[in-house]
Amino acid sequence: MKNGLVGYFGYGSLVNRQTLRTDFVAARPARLAGFRRYWQSRGRDIEPAAGDDIALLSVAPDPGASILGMLVVDRAGNLASVDEREARYDRLRIDRAQIEVLAPDGVDGAALPDELYLYVGRGRPDDGACLLQSYLDAVMAGFLAEFGEAGVHHFLATTSGFARTVIADRASPRYPRAVRLDPATARRFDQWLEAAGARFG
């Protein structure tokens, strides 16, 4: 592998730099071709949990689709830590041609690591699984920071399965890498989610 580096494309919470927990080398807005994003159950068969069944973001192959996200260039030695974070996902190799770096800043196509990965959820499609507001806040704040309001609307428009209940846990976050929002941004996020079909419980 080139210089001991690897890359992985984030399309959910990994888009938010505040949630990254490794001493990564670079994080650049990027576009991934050939996949679509959707909500699925995290899967009780993977890790039984009391209480609500929670949805997580995943992706599925779709030759005609593309999604915005974050390309994280990291040290290969950090992959085990990222794998632990993404414990409900399988890490799959992707082709360099599928990644377009939108803000290179020294990480252009020629400089991409040889090994590029994508985390794909092991759960199952399930419209009954709930969304965590604290997780949505982290994801949407990441898209807002990297792509502006247009990026948040891209996330909402290119993610299927928002017609489900949102657990309002912003005051007591259940997501372990929760972020703080100012009141105006929090209100906008909730309004946009409702417009996308989400229902607040």
Image: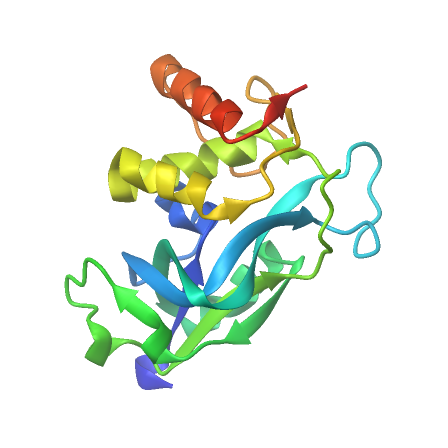
What residue appears at the point 22 percent right and 59 percent down from the top-left corner? 102
Q: How many marks?
A: 0
Q: Which quarter of the picture shows residue 156?
A: top left
Q: Which quarter of the picture shows residue 162?
A: top right
What residue appears at the point 37 percent right and 54 percent down from the top-left corner? 69
Q: Nearer the viewer, residue 37 or 80?
A: 37
Q: Along the horizontal axis of the image, is 99 left or right of 187? A: left
Q: In which quarter of the image is the N terminus?
A: bottom left
Q: Along the horizontal axis of the image, is 60 left or right of 150? A: right
Q: Which of 196 and 4 is in front in this view?
A: 196
| Residue 14 position in % (x across, y down) | 44, 51
| Residue 129 position in % (x across, y down) | 73, 39
Q: Nearer the viewer, residue 76 or 163?
A: 163
What residue appears at the point 72 percent right and 56 percent down from the top-left corner? 123
Extreme residue toward the left, this view:
105
What residue appears at the point 46 percent right and 36 percent down from the top-left corner? 138
Is residue 72 shown to the viewer in this render? Answer: no
Identify whether 157 is placed above or below 123.
above
The way the protein has been coloured in the rendering is rainbow
| Residue 31 position in % (x across, y down) | 33, 61
